[in-house]
Image (cartoon, rainbow, N blue to C red):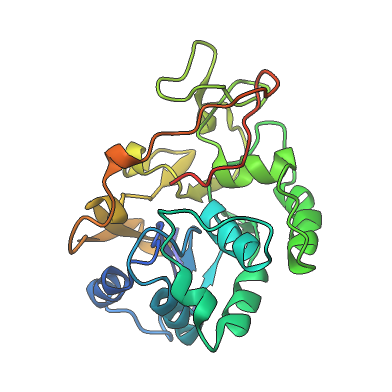
Amino acid sequence: MSTGGGARPQRVFIGDVQGCADELDDLLGALDYHPSRHQLWCAGDLVNRGPASLRTLRRLVELGAQSVLGNHDLHLLGVAAGERRLRKNDTFEEVLAAPDCSELLGWLRARPLVQLWDDIALVHAGLHPHWDDPRAVAAPLEAEIRRGAIPWRDASLVFLTRVRHCDAEGARPQEEFPAPDGFAPWDAHYTGRRLVVCGHWAARGLHRTARVHSIDTGCIWGGRLTAWIAEEDRCVSVPARRVYCDPKAFTPAKPSGSPAGSRPDATPES
């Protein structure tokens, strides 16, 4: 993926930061980041469960970075709007109390759900196998989010921000760990022409194929924070400074009373 002369800034895609501001700075140092040479794009889940969501948001805004929205970002917006309850494992209270909260949430609310280039699609979790035009799916959802009316139960929003496994028709399983017969990682059914860069699935680790680069490497769990430099086809990562969350404390929610092939969105997943 050559720049064809190097005049264009290199696109640097960063996995789920989730409030790990120190590691974000460590990663920028490892990248030798400079705004004239690099264009930063995050794969969503900028906040929550890590120790410094406020500092993370401020740093990204300061850097002029861009991002797609993840499920934890939407959860923060929902709590701020009074649509969701703050949960015991949420760690973004300092954002809600900050003097610049309104400005930061306004910036976050304006992020897209999907970003497309000729060669790459960026999304937090994944793309549905039947979507020929992901922007046509995402645009009306983004408009609602920007108006402050997050469509929590919209199946497309749930897929964009939460999918791990699905079947060939795009239905998600009732249980994911392990996924039942007939379900596979969503990218097994993806046939689009663009390489998809995504996060969300820390348990999968760094996963790179011709279809997908999944770059959530579990910084909050004591793993690493990873970036992929598109024009060099090269990954750079830094270790977590410590374990911020115990994976044993987070069990995926089991749906109750949901129709087959669907999952409720009431619990923000890691």
Q: Residue at x 80, y 68 (%)?
A: 147
Q: Quadrant of the N terminus?
A: bottom left
Q: Residue furthest top?
A: 181
Q: Is residue 7 above or below residue 109?
A: below
**In which quadrant of the rendered view does residue 78 lie?**
bottom right
**In which quadrant of the rendered view does residue 260 lie?**
top right
Q: Residue at x 32, y 67 (%)?
A: 51
Q: Is residue 7 above or below residue 151?
A: below
Q: Is residue 212 above or below residue 223?
A: above
Q: Where in the figure is residue 133, as x and y percent of width and height? A: 74, 46
Q: Is residue 5 visible?
A: no
The answer to whether residue 142 is left or right of residue 113 is right
Q: Nearer the viewer, residue 217 or 102?
A: 102
Q: Residue at x 63, y 39 (%)?
A: 159
Q: Residue at x 41, y 24 (%)?
A: 177
Q: Where in the figure is residue 119, as x and y percent of width and height? A: 57, 53
Q: Where in the figure is residue 16, as x and y percent of width and height? A: 41, 57
